[in-house]
Amino acid sequence: MNQASEILNQLDQCNSDYTFPMLDNGYVYLAGTKLSAYRDEKLWVILIEVIGFNYRGGGHNGISNCLHIYGNCLSYPPGTANENFLTLTDNANDSNTFDDEEDFYLNPHCSSFRLRNEVLPIIHDRQKYKSLGIEPEDETSINAFEFLRLLDALYHDKLVATEKEIRERIPADIPKIIELDEWFHPDVINGKLPSENETFKQISLTLETGNIEYFRPTQKPNTNWRNWPDGGTL
């Protein structure tokens, strides 16, 4: 039987090992999130997706969905791994999506890019960004992380992991019991632990019992990138 205490202990241990999501990671501009939880009578999995732009990678190499996977049925250590970073975007055929010098700004002469395997138009119109609450920092250019935040607002379902990508990493027959695009996440950089967090305490009880009634959050979700202004600022 799954035990809530064992689930929370694993999350705390991964937090100590820096493999639990830090949404204000100084190297990553947050764009989007998703949390899925799976269980049966013996097995459990929590999968947290963090979509962001790592400026050390730059350009398409900096854009990824990092899968943080925890559970008692994994063939690899819980947390993160290089193979659990999903590449999301690439150049289309016309030109480089980003500028050639820094790979940090949209190329104003590029009209399209590739999201997964679909070619889509690049939006350069600053008013479109502003209409979605994304205020470009530069007066003349669009940052890569602003572009990614626009993509998450418009195409979130294309940025998150597919069922195939998930089932390649967890047992194929374990049922999903919870799916969230937002939740109240612990401020781990300031010492808050997953085991002290309402969200993960309730999820762990749901995974132990199979009773979704245990998941009744009272705290306002905070996973939107606007709540983590220090992300990417190192």
Image (cartoon, grey):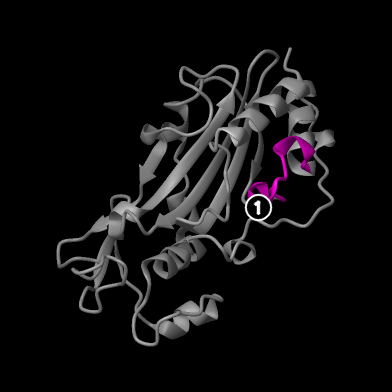
The residue lying furthest to the left in this view is 94
Point out residue 102 in the picture as x, y percentages from the top left corner. 25, 67
Residue type at the position of mark 1: Glu
Query: What residue did someone put label 1 on?
Result: 182
Q: Is residue 71 visible?
A: yes
Point out residue 16 in the picture as x, y percentages from the top left corner. 61, 34
In the image, 205: left or right of 226? right
Q: In the picture shown, does residue 118 fall above or below 35?
A: below
Report if residue 146 lies within the magenta region. Answer: no
CA neighbours of label 1 inside 10 A, class few (<14), some (14 to 19), many (20+): some
Quadrant showing the N terminus: top right
Give 125 or 228, whichever is nearer the viewer.
228
Q: Is residue 115 visible?
A: no
Q: In the picture shown, does residue 107 fall above or below 2?
A: below
Q: Which region of the structure is painted magenta?
A: 184-197
In the image, 194: left or right of 147? right
Secondary structure of residue under mark 1: loop
Q: In the picture shown, does residue 218 fall above or below 152?
A: above
Point out residue 227 in the picture as x, y percentages from the top left corner. 64, 63
The residue lying furthest to the bottom in this view is 139
In the image, 77: left or right of 112? right
Residue at (49, 64) in percent of width and height: 233
| Number of numbered discs overlaid on the protein picture | 1
Point out residue 232 in the picture as x, y percentages from the top left corner. 47, 61
Give 59 or 151, whichever is nearer the viewer.
59
